[in-house]
Structures are given as C-alpha cells and as structure tokens.
Amino acid sequence: MSKKTQTADGRRAALVMAGTGIFWIGATALGSYFGWSNRTIALFDLFALAGFGWALWMTFNIWRNRQKD
C-alpha cells in the first residue's frame, strides 16, 4: 500500500469520526429542543455508535496494512 493511499485512508477515517461526532451532537441537541422520546434519541445514539465503530474498523485496517510494510 502506497504512502498516498495510507494518507487518503487516514483522512477518510478522520472525516468519518468528525462527521459522526457532529451528527451525534446535533441529533442530541435537536432531540432535546424538540422533546423527542428516549427511543428516538437512542436510535440516533445507535447510528453514532455504528459510525464510530466503522471509523475504528477503518483505523484498524490502516494499522494492519502498515504492519505488512
């Protein structure tokens, strides 16, 4: 895997983490403002958990590919 590919993959993982964090904060704020039920807020929490899990998986794959070099 080239250095350029590793850099692009790392940037993509960082954007997923940042985007998920912003989404989660926004969903929590909107849920509080509009008085959404706990089930609805929990659904958005699960979406955020999935996003952070995916970013962790992407980061693990980057690390694993660097170990091969």
Image (tube, rainbow, N blue to C red):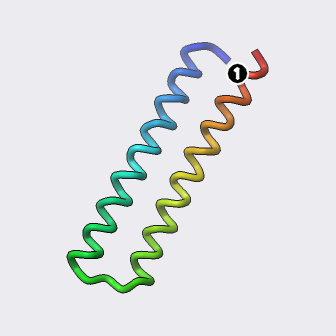
Which amino acid type is marked by label 1?
Arg
* Position above or below: 56 against 34: above
Number of callouts in the render? 1
Callout 1: SS = helix
Counting from the top left corner in percent of width and height, residue 9 is at 55, 29
Counting from the top left corner in percent of width and height, residue 20 is at 42, 52
Q: Image check: 57 left or right of 21?
A: right
* Position above or below: 31 against 27: below
Residue occupying image coordinates x 53% and y 60%: 49
Q: Image check: 63 left or right of 38?
A: right
Q: From the viewer's side, name the closer residue of 7 and 45.
A: 45
The answer to which quarter of the image holds residue 30 is bottom left
The answer to which quarter of the image holds residue 66 is top right
Judged from this view, the residue extending furthest toward the left is: 33
Judged from this view, the residue extending furthest toward the right is: 68
Counting from the top left corner in percent of width and height, residue 18 is at 40, 44
Residue occupying image coordinates x 47% and y 60%: 48
* Position above or below: 24 against 17: below
Residue occupying image coordinates x 29% and y 61%: 26
**Quarter containing the C terminus:** top right
**Quarter containing the N terminus:** top right
Residue occupying image coordinates x 59% and y 13%: 3
Q: Image check: 58 left or right of 24?
A: right
Counting from the top left corner in percent of width and height, residue 62 is at 64, 30
| Residue that numbered label 1 is attached to | 66
Q: Image check: 31 left or right of 68?
A: left
Q: Badge 1: how crowded within 10 Å, few (<14), some, or many (20+)?
A: few
